Amino acid sequence: MAEFEILFAEDSTDDAMLTLRALKKGGFLNKVHHVKDGAEALDFLYCEGAYAERDQNTKPKLILLDLKMPKVSGMEVLEKIKADPNLSSIPVVILTSSKEDPDIQRCYALGANSYIAKPVETENFFNAIKDIGMYWMILSQLPD
């Protein structure tokens, strides 16, 4: 199985397509694994369910996480990731439509590395995603 460097958890088809298009434009699409809910994100990270054959030693370098997802919320996924010593060093960027202060406060308290409210305007959203990929995948120095 290919090595994915970005785990992208997003249930909205429109937001996912736009995000994937922006990542492709930034040269990252072949390194992205898109999941549609929090349960699938956890299965991917813990090599369970459909991902039982995935190499447990291969961790994503970045997680893009929506908050409002079915099955398991993004907040719960964030909490599990940051509480797990094997995953806690992976940067998690919250990419959500919620601009609610309690959500922002809670995400940072749980260890989110960044919180980005999805810009409504398509061009702004597109540019923000390209910049996220550039910063976290190329410029930021992460532990191995």
Image (spheres, rainbow, N blue to C red):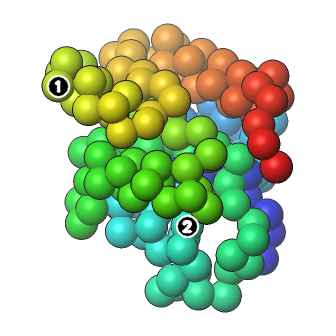
Dot 2 surroundings within 10 Å: few (below 14), some, or many (20 or more)? Answer: many
Q: CA distance from mark 1 to mark 2?
A: 26 Å
Q: Is residue 100 visible?
A: yes
x and y percentages locating residue 95 in the rendered image: 42, 32
x and y percentages locating residue 41 in the rendered image: 46, 63
Q: Is residue 68 above or below residue 124?
A: below
x and y percentages locating residue 86 in the rendered image: 61, 61
SS at badge 1 = helix
Task: State the residue at coordinates (72%, 22%).
Answer: 135
Which amino acid type is shown beneath numbered disc 1?
Pro
Which amino acid type is shown beneath numbered disc 2?
Leu
**Near-viewer residue (45 or 21):** 45
Q: Is residue 12 visible?
A: no
Task: State the residue at coordinates (54%, 74%).
Answer: 46
Dot 1 surroundings within 10 Å: few (below 14), some, or many (20 or more)? Answer: few
Q: Is residue 66 above or below residue 59?
A: above
> To which residue does mark 1 refer?
102
SS at badge 2 = helix
Q: Which mark is residue 45?
A: 2
